[in-house]
Image: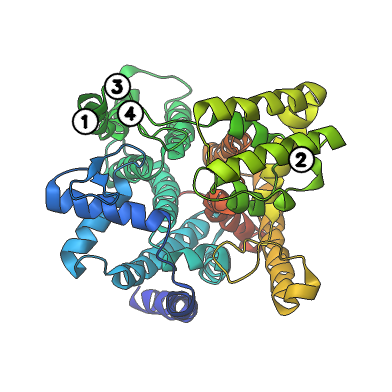
Amino acid sequence: MIKGKLRTVLWAALPLAAGLTLRLWYVLHAGRVEGDTLIYGSIAKNWLQYGIYGFTLGQDIPKPTLIRLPGYPLFLAVCFRLFGFDRYVAIMYLQCAIDLGTCLLISALSGKLFGHRSAKAALWLVVLCPFTAIYAAAPLTETLTLFTIALTWYSLERWQSTGAAFNRWLLAITVAMAYSVLLRPEQGLLPATVVPAMIWIVWQKSGRRLSLRSLRPIAVSAICIVLPLAPWAIRNWRTFHVIQPLAPRNATDPGENVPTGFQHWYRTWAIDFASTEQFYWNYDSTDLRIDDLPTRAFDSEDQYERTAALLSAYNEKNNATPAFDQRFEALAEQRIQAHPLRYYITLPVARLANMLFRPRPEMMQIGLDWWNWHEYRGKTLLAYASAALNLAYFLLGGIGLWLWRKNPGTYHALACAMTAFFVLRCALLLTLDNSEPRYTLEFFPLLIVWASCIFRTDSRQPATPS
């Protein structure tokens, strides 16, 4: 047994060392402290210093907010206590360790499902995945979210295998999903797929019969997942007098203007991440240039002139008011009525495909118009290589899932739950205005586990619980 554990440590040491090296390189050369990081950091500092969950906007007293859930600010608050305020590099190093823990969980899950060879393959695939590793160098929710996802799926497999109703793995599932929902509101999709899988597992083990006694552990787990949201919802009601158990879709506090007209107009043409940065994020903060719009933003010369006049008026007066927003709404309605299929089907699917398969340059020093060979050359090659590697992960994951679903053995519920999580998240992404590749990072733990099925020890028989 000792020799077996030693071999396990030795074969894991090399990929973990390679993964650590990659993440430390990102911290040193690609670390980013800007945007959402500063919002989370401001909330955490004000929470510690003033007892106010809010951020400071050029004033002494912080302004309360509900635009971000408390999961990541709580993590930052603990880090600030340990390392000092604004010690973001130390937080990046801690996130490197957490991300390597995610790698071990993914590898261990692959080993339980498909055998030792799959565990080794999964470990190499995940430690060297640049798309997830680079986020360890950014104090954002992504690293912790990926950890909670990996912990949830691994604990679900262990809970099924042990066969006990109440055990440490049920506790791990509950804690992982509860904290995941506190990190990002859309992570509610995780319990939405895992809890039905747990019911399915209990149903199969009890001879396809359910009782209140057999469902009790799952009910307790479900209540505990939702319970941490109660203090947050109560706080939001007492502070803002609104019912908000999660975070608002538009990331605005009560009373703030939501530019729905601009958003509708934006959805009539936007596809890629470049448009998100140049237009979506810049509205009501800086000038918008008509030269940055693609040709699909205009259906006629008259529409081009109307759009140019609208942007010119906005730039001259920075007039992002509700009345001005109605002019965007009128333009959006004209375009939607002319091409409803484009607005409701073609463009949402195109945005989803862009999030899934673009080169993912948002954290790398690659231009938004990465395809411009004459301007970037070397970086364009890097972008194409990044796109090819990203596509390879999806192809391997798809092949592995197909092989697994053909013969899932006793893990049919787990396979279905993972697939459902993937599908439901894609459906959610179809509803978003802004195309951001980081919203698809949550797929990579699944893709890597599925891909490891290609390397399973015995291709004829699936692994069985032990």
Mark 3 or mark 2, which is nearer to you?
A: 2
Amino acid identity at mark 4 = Pro
First reached walking from the N terminus: tag 2 or tag 1: 1
Disc ID at residue 235:
1
Disc ID at residue 297:
2
Task: State the SS at label 3.
Answer: helix
Disc ID at residue 245:
4
Q: Can you give x and y, in whole percent of width and height, for residue 464 in the image?
A: 51, 49
Query: What residue do we see at 18% from left, 43% from top?
Result: 52
Mark 3 or mark 1, which is nearer to you?
A: 1
Amino acid identity at mark 2 = Ala
Task: State the SS at label 1.
Answer: helix
Query: What residue do we see at 64% from left, 52% from top?
Result: 273
Read off the residue under disc 3: 213
Task: State the SS at label 2.
Answer: helix
> Closest to the observer: 311 or 345?
311
- Residues packed near mark 3 inside 10 Å, few (<14), some (14 to 19) or many (20 plus): few
Task: For marks 4 and 1, give the CA distance.
Answer: 9 Å
> Closest to the observer: 113 or 432?
432
Q: Is 235 above or below relative to 388?
A: above
Residue 448, located in which quarter of the rendered image? bottom right
73 relative to 436 in the view: left or right:
left
32 relative to 220 in the view: left or right:
right
Task: For marks 2 and 4, give the CA distance.
Answer: 36 Å
Task: For marks 3 and 2, give the CA distance.
Answer: 58 Å
